[in-house]
Image (cartoon, rainbow, N blue to C red):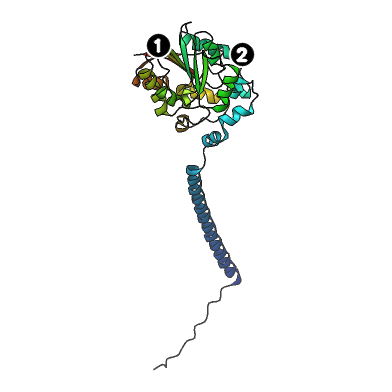
Amino acid sequence: MTPFRLRRRIPLIRPPFLQRVFARQKTEELRTRGAEHDALISRKRTQVAERESGIESETQVSPVETLKSEIDYETHARACDPKDFQSQVLRTPNGKPVGQDQVDWIIDAIAKGIAIAPDDVVLDLCCGNGAITDPILARCRGGVGVDRSPYLISVANANFERPPDRLYRLSDALEYVQTTADTDRITKVMCYGAFQCLPEETAAGVLLALRRRFPRVQRVFIGNLPDLSRAGIFWRELGSEPWSLHDLKRHDTHFGTWRTEDEVTKIATASGWCTEISRMPAAYFAAAYRFDAILTPL
């Protein structure tokens, strides 16, 4: 019987060139794993950045809020020249006050819209400094201008008031039409460039109070309303990114609420008024994207 012999395992010795091959393979494997790890980290960072960006876009102050915060009508008016009536009320396309030809078109449109007659007595709601109101009151027996700005009313009193026929009062528009006792003599009403700046409920309340409390009013002129259906024209002319519909529907901006003709008609009808839409001549600086509404009792 052949005796059992222990055999010692001889370690495998690879030739040097094979060792280099295996080393390169290991290195490539580590590099691949490292690249995959870096790619994963990059994707995670991108996802985090996108989430943070989404949160920021939801919470950041919109351009409308910035614009709103920069506009203080009272302070702006006080900073203008006391005789620069158009700049005081921000009637300044391209940063410059409109010319007299533009002002004349506005006055003519109002006079035609309310069919001004010598025996009329006119109420101007949100009259500002009275620069547009006074030429209208000069064509009739007179009337009253109402505005909530202390400074603008002081300008109106200093430059245009002629008691007892042409008067200017410091008051909120809705408060005035709901509380004044001076209702029976008013035959025509105007509100130029300000109706869109009233909150929706306030705007409706003004029209309702005029219908219920002013029995002799035959016509109401609401002028210079921003046309929602033509808002794109305005933004193209301005060379700026258009606002969202949500922002266009806000009353508390420089432009006020943008509405379609049908939306204005709906508000008026609900308050007992029939609506006729009119537009300014093409040469008027805002003719392409604003319109006027002429109301008569239903």
> The N terminus is located in which quarter?
bottom left
Tell me the element at label 1.
loop
Query: Considering depth in this image, is 259 or 145 the residue closer to the camera?
Result: 145
Q: x, y (%) of residue 11?
A: 52, 80
* Residue nearer the viewer, 105 or 29: 105
Residues at marks 2 and 1, CA–CA distance in whole angstroms:
29 Å
Taking the image as drawn, is residue 281 in sight?
A: no
Amino acid type of disc 2?
Gln
* Residue at 60% from the left image edge and 29% from the top image edge: 76
> Residue 135 is drawn in which quadrant?
top right
At mark 2, the secondary structure is helix
Residue bearing the label numbered 1:
218
**Cβ–Cβ below 8 Å for labels 2 and 1?**
no
Q: Position of residue 241 (x, y in %)?
A: 54, 31
The amino acid type found where label 1 is placed reads Gln
Instruction: Give me the residue at 49% from left, 44% from top.
Output: 59
Q: Nearer the viewer, mark 2 or mark 1?
A: 1
Q: Earlier in the sequence, mark 2 or mark 1?
A: 2
What residue occupies the far top of the structure in this picture? 118
Tag on residue 100? 2
Camera-nearest residue between 93 and 50: 93
Question: Can you give x and y, in whole percent of width and height, for residue 160 in the image?
Answer: 58, 16
Name the image quarter holding residue 158.
top right
